[in-house]
Image (tube, rainbow, N blue to C red):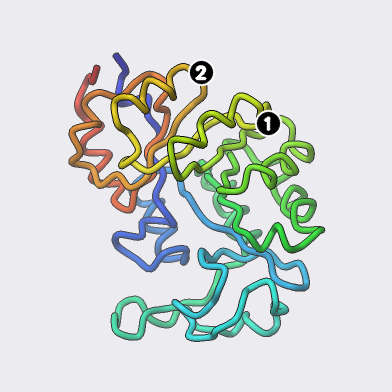
Amino acid sequence: MILLSEVKVYAHRGASGYALENTWNAFFKACEFGVGIELDVQITKDGVVVVYHDDNLRRLTGINAGIETLAYEEIKELRVGRKWMRNFSHHQMPLAYEVFQWAKKKKIPLNVELKESFVKNSKGPQILAAMLEGMEDVHLSSFNPQLLKQMKKLMPSTEMAWIIKKSTQLSRIKDMDWVDSIHLHKRLMAKSFCGEILKLDKKVRLYGILGSESLMNRLDPQMVGIITNYPDRVKRKIASPLVG
């Protein structure tokens, strides 16, 4: 049995159910809800860390280019948005350092997901580690376990979370002593899979949660966090006194 109040909520790419993902508007909205923030970081060709999800810029800027192939000067004026959604237009890509410092001032917990551009920039891990120095209540996540291994060497006291895509990856974790926790989509939470996770004695955070799922009524003690586009809905669910 676990108190839902002990589960920490993170707004996925900011409160992206209400504002365009990974923008200041989404982060401000998450702050209004009083939750942590999950955000994605990329690094440009010249070593500037920005907040953006996709490796390619096309979906939200219309520019068909890998973010790691361009210098910051080439992207800083790009407008991020969705032309067919009026309220989601005319955003500027945030600088990661500015978001980190704002979150530090506001005491907002951060889940920083490293994207593949950091694999392609040999200095990327060192640059990010320097930017995060002195930050509290921050953990790093990635689909790439080797990238997390690099970050663990640079930031040994910082939690590293591996985002897994399928259940077969669990068998690899026992050989990864740098992986402190697991992030996974709710659709992987079959009963048999839950048992395998519990054997690992690792912290777990779920993403893809909307707030109405029945699985929230039977969370195991290792489930320490929920990553959601709708943090207000999840917080209302957390108002329930107990699950178990």
Left or right relative to 21: residue 95: right
Q: Amino acid at mark 2?
A: Asp
The one of 16 and 193 positioned closer to us in this rendering: 193
Residue 69, quarter of picture: bottom right
The one of 30 and 234 positioned closer to us in this rendering: 234
Q: Residue at x 44, y 77 (%)?
A: 59
Q: Amino acid at mark 1?
A: Trp
Q: Residue at x 23, y 42 (%)?
A: 211
Residue matched to label 1: 178
Q: Is residue 121 above or below residue 84?
A: above
* Residue 36 on image: x %, y %: 45, 43
Q: Is residue 205 above or below residue 22?
A: above
Quadrant position of the N terminus in the picture: top left
Q: Earlier in the sequence, mark 2 or mark 1?
A: 1
Mark number for residue 201?
2
Mark 2 lies on a secondary structure that is: loop
Residue 177, quarter of picture: top right
